[in-house]
Image (spheres, rainbow, N blue to C red):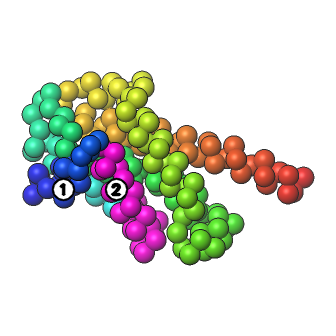
Amino acid sequence: MSRWLAIFFGAGLLKPAPGTWGSAVALGLGMLILHFAGFVALVVATVVVTALGFWACAVQLSPGQDPSEVVIDEVAGQWLTLLFPAAGFALAPAAQAAVMANGGWLPWPAWLFPFVLFRLFDIWKPGIIGRADRRGDPAGVMLDDLWAGLFAGVVTVILAAAYHVPLILMRHP
């Protein structure tokens, strides 16, 4: 079971770029959870997959290992990133109206930017993300993606504010 979790039920076996495939599968599944079960369900799913990811990596990996087919870390990081725009839509009535106008789905910038930014931080690995990756232990496999998810989520919110705040100010001077 730990192997299936580590490769996220086969998503890590997709080629090329299994990490990107793992993130894409996570994004699609996260959007489904959000759409059909709501924000709180995505929070719970993120916590559960993170805990299971630490367990699966500890069972499956030896120190120094980070095989490309292990993508449970991408799932946890991508869902963490997705929580940021999802929280904005869950907490803001005007944003909820935008979701309802889109058939109950997050509008495309709210999922595309988190996906792209998460992949950017996961590949680039600046600062603490790189330090977590260089730990060389199974926990580091998970931690670098969680840090990448946190950074990507914060940048997503900053970009959303940079776009939306001027629009709001123009409408309501």
Of the pair 109 and 139, the residue shown nearer to us: 109
11 is higher (above) or lower (below) than 120: below
The residue under the point 54% across, 64% down is 106
Q: Which residue is mark 1?
A: 10
Q: In the image, 88: left or right of 80? A: right
Q: In the image, 165: left or right of 55? A: right
Residue 157 image offset from top left, x and y in percent: 59, 46
Of the pair 129 and 121, the residue shown nearer to us: 121
In the rendered image, is residue 62 in sight?
A: yes
Q: Residues within 10 Å of mark 1 (few under 14, many from 20)?
A: some
> What distance separates the C-alpha of mark 2 from that of mark 1?
12 Å
Tell me which amino acid carries mark 1.
Gly
Determine whether the residue tagged by mark 1 lies in a helix, strand or loop: loop
Q: Residues within 10 Å of mark 2 (few under 14, many from 20)?
A: many
The residue under the point 40% across, 68% down is 32
76 is higher (above) or lower (below) than 97: above
Residue 26 is tagged as 2
The residue under the point 24% across, 36% down is 141
Tell me which amino acid carries mark 2.
Ala
Is-magenta flag for residue 43? yes
> Which residues fall within the magenta stretch?
19-44
